[in-house]
Image (cartoon, rainbow, N blue to C red):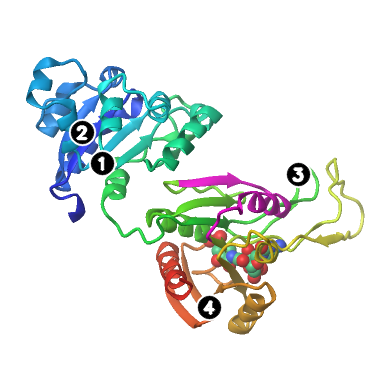
Amino acid sequence: MASLNGKHVLLGITGGIAAYKCAELVRGLRKAGAEVRVVMTAAAERFVTPTTLQALSGYPVRSSLWDEAAEAAMSHIELARWADLILVAPASADALARFAGGHANDLLSTLCLASEAPVHLAPAMNRVMWANTATQDNVAVLRARGFRIHGPDSGEQACGETGEGRMLEPMQLIEALADIPQPWRGRRLLITAGPTYEDLDPVRFLGNRSSGKMGFALAASAAAQGGEVVLIAGPVALPTPPGVRRIDIRSAAQMHEAVMAELAGIDTFIAAAAVADYRPKSVSAGKIKKSEGDSSLELQRTLDILAAVSVSPMRPKRVVGFAAETERLDEHAQEKMRNKGLDAIAANAVGQSGSGFESSHNALTVFTRAGRHAIPLTTKRQAADALLDILREQLP
Ligand code: PMT
């Protein structure tokens, strides 16, 4: 955490229940070597007291633009210049709207407008407020203007609902602020993950063993390294990695549609999903009844999403596939790379425990046009980091 050492961090707190986490955030930032000054909105003061934050930061907490004594000690313009970075946590829906609108009607919004320091936002709100188009439009505007958005996380919310909208944990925010290398900054990645389910009737489907862990690890790694990541996920029970935009789908046809809709402007497409090659030829509207004797299913091919991306007029610069093989790994992977017109393919052995499907670990053999690279058995997150390094170095 050396990179926060000596940094001037201006922490803006807006009104939301997650404000209680700010005490730990201030402590963590100071432990990482940062000097912290806190600015609170009037609503934030209803959730946590300035006295607590003053004691933890070691400086008086500011909240009003019209506090003459505070302005005499350090004017708001001086405070804006003092900051090396601004972190607004929690950033409420109202705060996002005001920042997006360029308002300067309280101290915090004025500081965000008046400072040249990077502004990091940690949104936190009820899941429906977060999903609302108004909020999402504001986030898109802020992102385009260079605000860094961290989270929100998904899970159980203070309001009793479950979904996306929880503020990231203080430690996650501190890690995000620390200067980890950002080689994927400015690049947009589209990543698929998880299985697809092909419905047979209202209660049955054809699926596979993919847990989504490999694709989610890639999304988390790319986002942590500055990439703008869209993750298209099959039915899995995994939290969305911080900073990643997630689209949930169920079937191969839905994944195909979502991928094509997101393809414009993508730099790197990575297909880590285990997509069904076949689906039932017809889907029964009612539950298929059991009858005497055996039965058989008629199947039809699904579209190959990866091959379709590779020949698309919007083809990303790097099109990367996975190959899940039970035998002749190298041979089958290279064949898939050729047939689907890929720039790289990551092959993994499946059908065994401890790697491949479901496990938190994996070993990959990566083929690029330049050669073969082995990533020995490790955690899926480390395998993802290594794969992204290979893609950057071999396919610049
Ligand atoms: O999800 P986990 O439990 O973490 O497991 C990870 C994994 C084993 C699923 C992953 O590492 C992996 O190998 N993903 C690809 C699985 C797969 O479908 O492999 P394949 O060899 O059948 O397909 C080759 C490539 O074509 C894949 O990139 C696949 O996404 C893509 N494909 C396949 C069929 C199809 N209709 N459309 C596709 O895009």
Q: Which mark is residue 117?
A: 1
The quadrant the N terminus occupies is bottom left
* Amino acid type, mark 3: Val
* Amino acid type, mark 2: Ala
In space, the residues marked 2 and 4 are separated at their CA atoms by 48 Å
In space, the residues marked 1 and 4 are separated at their CA atoms by 40 Å
**Residue bearing the label numbered 2:** 80
Q: Is residue 38 visible?
A: yes
Labels 2 and 1 touching (C-beta < 8 A): yes
Q: Position of residue 262 (x, y in %)?
A: 61, 50
Q: Position of residue 141 (x, y in %)?
A: 46, 36
In space, the residues marked 4 and 3 are separated at their CA atoms by 42 Å
Question: Is disc 1 surrounded by few (<14), some (14 to 19) or many (20+) residues within 10 Å?
Answer: some
* Amino acid type, mark 4: Thr
Sequence-earlier tag: 3 or 2: 2
Sequence-earlier tag: 2 or 4: 2
Labels 4 and 3 touching (C-beta < 8 A): no
* Foreground label between 4 and 3: 4
Q: Secondary structure at mark 3?
A: loop
Q: Nearer the viewer, residue 387 or 368?
A: 368
In space, the residues marked 3 and 1 are separated at their CA atoms by 54 Å
